[in-house]
Image (cartoon, helix red, strand yellow):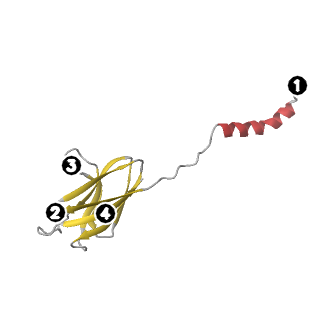
Amino acid sequence: MSSPSQLYRLVPFVIAATALACGGSSPTQPTSTVTQTFDGTVLQNGMSSNTFTMGQDGTATVTVVSFSPVSTITMGVGFGTPQTDGSCPLIAASNNVQMGAVLSTDLTAGSYCLAVYDVGNVAATVPISYEVTVDHP
């Protein structure tokens, strides 16, 4: 039979073993980033949108690669939720976007649309073509 003093010496080891068996924090998995490139054309007072799916919560970032034929034009760019009728109601947007601009927002996993739209600067006879990239988890 063990003496009480011998049992007390085992207590720290039992506590440590129990703590290890109960878990602790597991290492987090690195988030991989997906980059998608979209292009389209915006007519006067119009909007063009492209859809993408985020596999997990995180930050979505759009970068305006180009506007043409007027590279200095100011446009609107935003993230929205795609609707069955093809519309893209915006949930985060900027109405003051030029070529090279970056817009980011935090989104939960799901389907989204990226919209590029006229804020009053597209001429009736000169539609604007665009290219953007979207980085997201």
Q: Quadrant of the N terminus?
A: top right
Q: State the residue in front, 3 or 101.
A: 101
Q: Is residue 74 left or right of residue 3?
A: left
The residue that label 4 is drawn on is 132
Residue at horizontal 78%, vertical 36%? 11
Residue at horizontal 17%, vertical 60%? 46
Sequence-first tag of 1 and 3: 1
Q: State the residue in front, 26 or 16.
A: 26
Q: Is residue 60 visible?
A: no
Sequence-first tag of 3 and 2: 2
Q: Nearer the viewer, mark 1 or mark 2?
A: 2
- Write down the quadrant of residue 3 in the picture: top right
Mark 2: amino acid: Leu
Sequence-first tag of 4 and 1: 1
Q: Position of residue 104 (x, y in %)?
A: 37, 60
**CA distance for labels 4 and 2:** 17 Å
Circles 4, 1 touching at the beta carbon (< 8 Å): no
The residue that label 2 is drawn on is 43
Tell me if mark 4 has few (under 14), some (14-19) or many (20+) residues whose alpha carbon lies within 10 angstroms of its own.
Answer: many
The residue that label 3 is drawn on is 86
The label on residue 1 is 1
